[in-house]
């Protein structure tokens, strides 16, 4: 563990006080590594955000233990400004040890106003850089430059040419690195000071990945045409460009073309039609050309497969590494359904082997780091229950803003990519900003979907844990707690067919500020699917082409809604290993998991089925003991292949998290 984390963790000494109250203005104890290290010392950490929920935790998990003579050590964490030591319950504070941590203590040479906008994952690099390169105090401007240089590897002073700029933007956006707004503005200002970038749309392509990919996509056909048509190619296309800036870009430059293959493999750039030209097909440009669509798809899959093998994250990788990788992996799943029969036959052993390796690595990471993810601040969301808090953060300083949250039950990342392609072909205007989140494990609808609407971890809705009829109540309660009136809160649950549009119109007609829409069409398709992932991809595409998703988004955005799209879980293809005959012993009998009220009931099935995995998590209710089926296997008729969910594979756990701004 890094030095700055050690300085925090060492202050937590076991058996000094039952309760430790911590003032944590910068969310340092939300860092997964710090969270895990403190818990490893025997402490339980509770964030004091809601007095009612805190009291529930305090009485049910700790007071009960102490009253019976047991041992438990509680860390109560709060953010000053929202709460203070004196606002904690008197019986909690009476004998509590008090601690406080701040970025000012860790980074005394750097500007606090800049650093408080960074996520903790950047602090390791920053701490090392401060020791080596910051002997004197830095003001705001100096700190912004310092952070850009030493944390994000961006030095505006050395970006002098178009290839320099393109390389920096490709590296920034392909890695899905998000700069805080203050640093984005600093970078844009520094680049605008250079005369050769005066006509570039830096204000949009620096902060927005989607806008940058659009910018490149507009110019790739011009570059391809210029290989034979010369100057006339970009003169002809200049008036058609949405984004200002040079029409002809140096894609062939060494610093740029190193990214081009990956951008096409991942579907971020779109290939163009091109006749068979041996000279072109032999070089790096061919992945961005359609000699034939089938050939291009086979090529992209082949190249992507090679990269996925090399780049698979490990158990010590960051959550952000895994979420970014999940998108590339999702693209491979899409291409697998589209490649030629000959290519599928060629890769029939390699691709399943990759899947197995990836999910082994992912499960190792889950065991190592998943436990602390739920504790992250909702303003930097990592899990589905962060979504309402993220939306609330967006609305905080924008009283006229409206947000619609569409939860597509069971939508995996690869199925989102199919849906997105259809939306773009249908002419959906504007940019689509894509990220991903982690679902709750076990990845079943009652648990993960309730969390997504409640904005709370499952431990706090233990009484309704396995119900599917409380989503609206949770959603309304979340927003009522934040001061919205009933008519400002909307909710509708529909299949997702064209016949359901009037129900959406009714929900919009009440003029809500926040509107939640559940679509369960994809989950219904999945549970009836008999043709595996290939059939699933085709059915999602058919649903999209029937027009409902495009009509829904067009209507919402036209009414001024920013749209957030996500899912409660994904799905995976699995082969049956038999179904345990347990009667009422299991509270939930899913294809990829079993949920029991007691670990002793789980033990029999754990012993009977080799490779099954016991799963327990602090964020789940105390009486929840889960058993997960092995990777690519399901608790169903032996030998039967089905699409299902409930387990802990990358396909089930990582779900899309999409933002589509309103039309303004």
Image (spheres, helix red, strand yellow):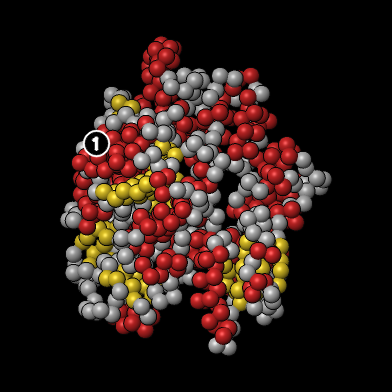
- Which residue is depicted at the point 52% across and 39% down? 399
Q: At 33% across and 73% down in the image, what residue appears?
A: 595
Task: Give the quadrant of the N terminus.
Answer: bottom right
Is 52 left or right of 308, judged from the image as shown? right
Inspect this view and state whether residue 447 appears: yes
**The quarter of the displayed image where residue 178 is located:** top right
Report which residue position mark 1 lands on: 547
Q: Is residue 351 above or below residue 183?
A: below
Q: Is residue 124 visible?
A: no
Residue lying farthest to the bottom in this orientation = 69
Which residue sits at x=55%, y=73%?
A: 58
Label 1, secondary structure: give it: loop
Residue 603: percent from left, percent from top: 35, 82
- Pick the residue in front: 92 or 417: 92
Residue 61's x, y, as percent? 52, 76
Q: Residues within 10 Å of mark 1 (few under 14, many from 20)?
A: some
């Amino acid at each position: 563990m890094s030095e700055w984390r050690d300085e925090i963790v060492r202050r937590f000494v076991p058996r000094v006080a039952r309760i430790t109250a911590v003032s944590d203005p910068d969310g340092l104890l939300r860092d997964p590594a710090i969270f895990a290290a403190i818990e490893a010392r025997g402490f339980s950490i509770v964030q004091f955000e809601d007095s009612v929920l805190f009291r529930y935790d305090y009485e049910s998990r700790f007071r009960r233990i102490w009253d019976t003579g047991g041992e438990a050590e509680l860390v109560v964490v709060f953010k000053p400004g929202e709460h203070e030591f004196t606002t904690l319950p008197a019986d909690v504070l009476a004998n509590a040890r008090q601690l406080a941590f701040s970025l000012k203590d860790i980074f005394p040479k750097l500007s606090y106003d800049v650093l408080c906008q960074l996520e903790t994952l950047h602090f390791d690099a920053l701490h090392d850089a401060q020791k080596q390169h910051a002997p004197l105090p830095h003001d705001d401007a100096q700190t912004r430059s310092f952070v850009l240089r030493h944390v994000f590897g961006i030095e505006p002073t050395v970006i002098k040419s178009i290839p320099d700029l393109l390389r920096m933007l490709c590296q920034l956006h392909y890695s899905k690195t998000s700069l805080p707004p203050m640093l984005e503005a600093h970078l844009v200002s520094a680049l605008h000071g250079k005369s050769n970038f005066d006509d570039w749309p830096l204000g949009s392509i620096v902060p927005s990945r989607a806008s940058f990919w659009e910018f490149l996509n507009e110019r790739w056909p011009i570059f391809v045409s210029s290989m034979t048509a010369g100057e006339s190619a970009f003169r002809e296309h200049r008036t058609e460009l949405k984004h200002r800036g040079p029409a002809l870009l140096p894609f062939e430059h060494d610093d740029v073309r190193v990214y081009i293959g990956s951008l096409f493999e991942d579907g971020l750039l779109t290939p163009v039609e091109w006749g068979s030209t041996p000279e072109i097909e032999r070089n790096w440009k061919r992945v961005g050309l359609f000699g034939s669509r089938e050939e291009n798809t086979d090529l992209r899959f082949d190249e992507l497969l090679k990269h996925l093998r090399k780049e698979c994250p490990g158990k010590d990788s960051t959550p952000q590494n895994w979420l970014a990788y999940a998108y590339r992996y999702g693209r491979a799943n899409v291409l697998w359904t589209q490649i030629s029969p000959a290519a599928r036959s060629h890769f029939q052993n390699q691709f399943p082997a990759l899947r197995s390796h990836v999910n082994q690595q992912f499960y190792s990471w889950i065991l190592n780091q998943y436990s602390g993810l739920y504790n992250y601040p909702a303003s930097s969301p990592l899990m589905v229950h962060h979504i309402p808090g993220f939306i609330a953060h967006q609305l905080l300083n924008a009283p006229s803003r409206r947000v619609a949250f569409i939860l597509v039950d069971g939508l995996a990342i690869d199925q989102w990519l199919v849906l997105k392609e259809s939306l773009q072909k249908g002419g959906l205007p504007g940019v689509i900003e894509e990220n991903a989140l982690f679902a709750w494990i076990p990845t079943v609808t009652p648990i993960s979907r309730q969390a997504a609407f409640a904005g709370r971890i499952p431990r706090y809705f233990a009484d309704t844990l396995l119900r599917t009829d409380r989503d609206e109540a949770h959603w309304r309660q979340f927003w009522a707690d934040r001061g919205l009136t009933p008519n400002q809160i909307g909710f509708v649950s529909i299949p997702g067919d064209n016949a359901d549009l009037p129900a959406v119109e009714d929900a919009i007609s009440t003029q809500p500020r926040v509107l939640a829409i559940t679509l369960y069409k994809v989950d219904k398709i999945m549970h009836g699917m008999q043709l595996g992932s290939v059939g699933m991809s085709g059915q999602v595409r058919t649903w999209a082409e029937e027009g409902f998703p495009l009509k829904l988004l067009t209507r919402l955005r036209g009414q001024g809604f920013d749209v957030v799209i996500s899912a409660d879980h994904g799905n995976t293809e699995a082969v049956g290993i038999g179904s345990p005959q347990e009667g009422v012993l299991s509270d939930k009998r899913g294809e990829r998991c079993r949920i029991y009220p007691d670990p002793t009931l789980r033990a029999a099935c754990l012993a009977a089925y080799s490779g099954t995995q016991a799963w327990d998590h602090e964020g789940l209710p105390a009486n929840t003991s889960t058993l997960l089926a092995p990777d690519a296997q399901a608790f169903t008729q032996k030998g039967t292949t089905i699409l299902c969910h409930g387990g802990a594979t990358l396909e089930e756990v990582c779900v899309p998290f999409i933002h589509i701004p309103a039309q303004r």
